Image: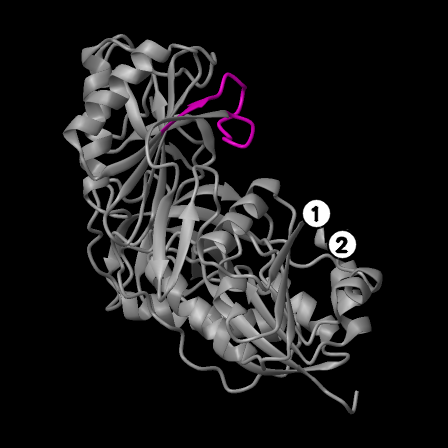
């Protein structure tokens, strides 16, 4: 059931003036700053306060005295509960404006960077059904939304197959329709839930860590083909096979089926035993003349159409010569490395995740390329002067680090080796700003291009081109 938070009263007439970097709206009342959920700049809101601190408060909108012209009606019934698509109530063109502003503010405020003229953020071609992967959680006791009737925990209505409630790991919202992935995914998910209830298969209890069905992962490509991974906590092959056989008969678009056996205490698939049950071992995504094989554990940008635009921009920024040696740090499954490989002498990819490098090597073979090499390990330890002396001094370095940004040792090695160009892809402008501030010792920031990879959220990808300044 829904947990009641400690309340601190309602403040009326809060003027919403901005959006913070974490996606919450910024309100002002007298001299107090209030971070507000479900509000839009231009609103005048009555706000229920949930947290009170010395310099600020937090809360959520309970009613509006005045609606902003930037506001629109959210299209999903789960808006505000499941934790996804937090900006559904904000018109898309305004979302893009705030994302552009966020990128520029973080680069100048945190990095103190001198920026070139920034091109407008590239919008996503699709703003619904744009994701190629979703992960759902089975729960024996679902989260009941406000106003819903309560059901006995043994009732079918008490079970959930959906998303975690934000900040509540043991609470799951049952999802009837999600707009993030191809609508066929909704039909598959709902069928599996109904079939499991009909067969009286137990749903996992996150709190007691008892139960059979644990997670459902659906991946799809641009051609409408699906991969299904069913994660189970109990080794019950006969029952699992029954589910997968039935779903594969009902949905021929599912071309690859896996069982993930995961009896551990966390939901991560990293250590799960992956069993190929039926169909293809890989889901294939095609971009231009390149094919990318996606395995159950592969990392692949979740917005395929927008990922293609980003990869093209990285290639354009790199603009390699046939004699160039390119290093692709944090290469993942080698997608960017493959995109630039036809234009240069050689690409060296470095990645910490062993399974990702396995996929990168498979993709290289799949595309019949012979000028790529991949190495497993921490870029901070592998990417050294000695390593590059052995494999060739880089003319261009492409880096796409995790949200934490690049390790200081990687930044220092870049300053020591001084490649002619650095193309820096980032999902966190704050850490990108920090790293580029250090790199400005030897580099000029020449171009910037932001991408909206995740419509209706505050998340952004940003690509920067840095060129060596011979005078520094």
Q: Is residue 53 left or right of residue 27?
A: right
Range covered by the magenta-colored residues: 258-272
Where residue 264 sits, quadrant-wise, is: top right
Q: Residues within 10 Å of mark 2 (few under 14, many from 20)?
A: some
Look at the magenta stretch and give its main secondary structure.
Answer: loop
Where residue 397 sits, quadrant-wise, is: bottom right
Contact (Cβ within 8 Å) of mark 1 with mark 2: yes
In the foreground, 83 or 389: 389
* Residue 150 seen in render: no
Residue 337 in picture, x, y percent from top left: 54, 63
In the foreground, 293 or 13: 293
Residue located 38% across and 55% down the image: 457
Residue 198 in picture, x, y percent from top left: 18, 12
Residue bearing mark 1: 377
Considering only vertical position in the picture, is 196 above or below 461? above
Residue 420 circle label: none
- Tell me the distance, in whole angstroms, between the alpha carbons under discs 1 and 2: 6 Å
Instruction: Find out whether residue 226 is within the magenta segment.
Output: no
Residue 377 in picture, x, y percent from top left: 70, 47
Residue bearing mark 2: 382
Residue located 72% across and 74% down the image: 439
């Amino acid at each position: 059931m829904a947990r009641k938070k400690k309340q601190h009263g309602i403040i009326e007439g809060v003027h919403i003036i901005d959006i913070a970097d974490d996606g919450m709206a910024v309100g002002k009342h007298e001299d107090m700053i209030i971070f507000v959920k479900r509000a839009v700049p231009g609103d005048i809101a009555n706000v229920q306060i949930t947290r009170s601190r010395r310099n600020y408060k937090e809360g959520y909108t309970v009613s509006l005295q005045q609606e902003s012209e930037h506001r629109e009606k959210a299209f999903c019934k789960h808006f505000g509960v499941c934790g996804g698509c937090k900006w559904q109530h904000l018109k898309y063109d305004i979302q893009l404006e705030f994302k552009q502003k966020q990128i520029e503010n973080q680069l100048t405020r945190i990095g103190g960077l001198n920026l070139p003229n920034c091109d407008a953020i590239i919008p996503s071609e699709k703003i619904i059904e744009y994701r190629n992967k979703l992960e759902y959680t089975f729960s024996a006791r679902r989260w009941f939304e406000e106003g819903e009737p309560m059901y006995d925990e043994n009732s079918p209505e008490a079970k959930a197959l959906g998303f975690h409630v934000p900040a509540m790991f043991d609470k799951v919202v049952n999802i009837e329709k999600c707009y993030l992935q191809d609508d066929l995914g909704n039909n598959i998910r709902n069928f599996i839930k109904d079939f499991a209830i009909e067969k009286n298969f137990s749903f996992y209890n996150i709190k007691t860590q008892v139960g059979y069905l644990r997670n459902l992962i659906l991946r799809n490509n641009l051609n409408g083909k699906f991969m299904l991974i069913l994660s189970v906590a109990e080794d019950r092959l006969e029952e699992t096979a029954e589910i997968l056989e039935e779903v594969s008969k009902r949905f021929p678009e599912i071309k690859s089926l896996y069982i993930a056996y995961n009896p551990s205490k966390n939901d991560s698939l990293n250590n799960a035993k992956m069993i190929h049950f039926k169909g293809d071992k890989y889901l294939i995504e095609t971009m231009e003349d390149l094919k990318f094989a996606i395995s159950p554990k592969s990392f692949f940008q979740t917005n395929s159409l927008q990922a293609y635009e980003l990869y093209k921009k990285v290639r354009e920024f790199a603009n390699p010569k046939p004699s160039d040696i390119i290093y692709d740090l944090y290469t993942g499954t080698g997608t960017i490395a493959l995109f630039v490989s036809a234009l240069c002498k050689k690409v060296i990819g470095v990645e910490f995740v062993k399974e990702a490098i396995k996929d990168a090597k498979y993709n290289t073979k799949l595309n019949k390329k012979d000028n790529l090499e991949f190495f497993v390990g921490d870029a901070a330890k592998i990417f050294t002067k000695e390593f590059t002396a052995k494999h060739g001094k880089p003319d261009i370095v492409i880096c796409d680090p995790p949200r934490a940004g690049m390790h200081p040792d990687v930044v220092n090695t870049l300053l020591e080796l001084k490649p002619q160009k650095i193309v820096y892809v980032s999902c966190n402008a704050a850490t990108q700003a920090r790293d580029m501030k250090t790199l400005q010792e030897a580099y000029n920031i020449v171009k910037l291009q932001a991408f909206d990879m995740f419509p209706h959220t505050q998340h952004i990808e940003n690509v920067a081109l840095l060129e060596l300044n011979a005078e520094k």
